[in-house]
Image (spheres, grey):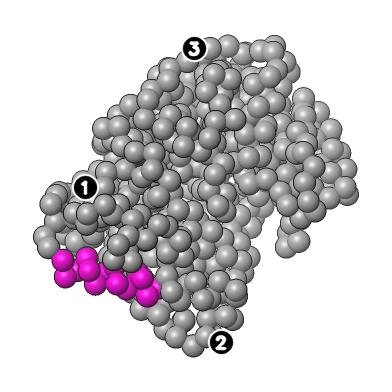
Amino acid sequence: MPSSVDYLRRLRTPAPVADRDAAGPGVTVLVPTYTAPETDRIESLRLCADSVLRGGPARSGLPVSFVVVDNGLSPAAARRLGALLAATGRPHHIVRSPSRPPGDRYTAAQARNAGLAHLAGLPADSPLRHRYLLFLDDDTALAPDALELLIATLETRRQAVAACPRVVPVADPARWLHRPRPGPASAAVRLPGALRDGEYDLLSTTSHGSLVTGRTVGLLVRQGPVLASIRRHGPLFYEATPYGSTEDILVMAVLSHLGELWSVPAAEVADETRKTPGTTRAQQYKWGYDHAWLSRAMSDAGLLRPGVHTLSWAPGHGWRYTRHAWGPVTGFLINPDELTLGHRMLSALTEQRSVAAGLFGPRAGQITAGTRLLGRILRRWRTGPAPEVETHRPDLPPLAGRDWAGLRDGLDALIGHLAGNAVGSLDNRPGPDGVPLCFLYGARQPAVQGAPALTTQTTS
């Protein structure tokens, strides 16, 4: 298997492959699943499969098959999964993960790569192979017309390799499926992608990811070129992040070498949110840590320009990009005003050791030290010399207010994410003055609904 550095360096060089749409019409659904103590993921997978079959395929007779990766199922859950798939009446296969210590499981990236490796080894006429490949999680559900809309996007745009739905975080996907249907949605738009002049735009990918590259959940791709790329160049998903929580942050750059990326806002997929503030903090911590860790890995691979890159929001003017020269440092600051607020909150939460331990458990000491480092970096950024580069980013939509009512966009999510950034940056290599040679701070930024479409095109 190629090393993580090989994978990242591969992003810089277009690697066109043949084998476009070699298989017949239809959809292969790839889903990883595992046994979790807090929820019945087999039951949520049942809802996921039903949402696929009761939508477009039920009306059109479209061939559908399922490839499910056993990503750490208990014996009882594995039996239930077999019965569930048999009841669909569709071709299916369970890819079983290799044995490993009890309680361990693949990351989502490793699980999806295992399923893709199985598909790549099948003949084109296998009942599991079809023209299109749909990535879903076991806690997601497609709106009734979503699959038809995604297929139509790829059918009418021959240069497109992937179509992304709009991902809607919800507490109860079953209830969401029975909600009143929304009104007309925005038309499909080509995504700009994360590659800009041979470098990776980590700043806008972490701040506006779904509007720049899309999401893996609900992603529909042309199966032929994707499997041909895997056979020739290795795994599609990056497996090296410490927490394995950002499996879709790099895959779109790989796909952009194979064709255009399109967003289809009218196609919706529900993604079940965490149930409690504590589990939300833990999830967001992992995302924040991996984003900061990627700043080092991608810098080592030559994908990032040195300097401190910043996105600042100015009401009435939009997003402003600046780059400051800090010697060998490569850093990223997303919305410094919000980072200042986050630093104050984390400072207050970590001031008392017992309070910090209650919120963050054994990570409390690292979060405390990482919060102090964040304060040093913000002070240096605010009081340092003027930027070398300053420009506007009209391709990024206007900033919207955060919806503090929901867990994923609530206060616990922001605190958890910035805590992960703080520790991930702290763990990167320190420079001569104690500032890490690579760092990243900043959460996803909410966008105004119905904002103008992005206009910057992918550079490959």
**What's under tag 2, amino acid-wise?**
Ser
Residue located at (19% from left, 54% from top)? 325
In the rendered image, residue 404, in percent from the top left (x then y), is placed at: 44, 70
**What's under tag 3, amino acid-wise?**
Ala
In contact (CB < 8 Å): disc 2 and disc 1: no
Against 194, is 434 above or below?
Answer: below
Labels 3 and 2: the sequence-earlier one: 3
Q: Main secondary structure of the magenta part?
A: helix
Residue located at (63% from left, 37% from top)? 112
Q: If the image is split into quadrants, where does the N terminus sit?
A: top right
Q: If the image is split into quadrants, where does the C terminus sit?
A: top left
Q: Which mark is residue 248?
A: none
Residue located at (58% from left, 20% from top)? 231
Labels 2 and 1: the sequence-earlier one: 2
Residue located at (40% from left, 57% from top)? 429
Tag in front: 3 or 2: 2
Is disc 2 placed on a helix, strand or loop? helix
Q: Which mark is residue 354?
A: 2
Is 343 left or right of 308, judged from the image as shown? right
In the rendered image, residue 6, in percent from the top left (x then y), is placed at: 47, 32
- Residue at mark 1: 393
Is disc 1 placed on a helix, strand or loop? loop
- Residue at mark 3: 18
Q: What whole-number distance in Å separates the C-alpha atoms at marks 1 and 3?
A: 35 Å
Q: Few, some or many C-alpha atoms within 10 Å of disc 2 (few <14, some 14-19, many ≥20)?
A: few
In the rendered image, residue 261, in percent from the top left (x then y), is placed at: 41, 30
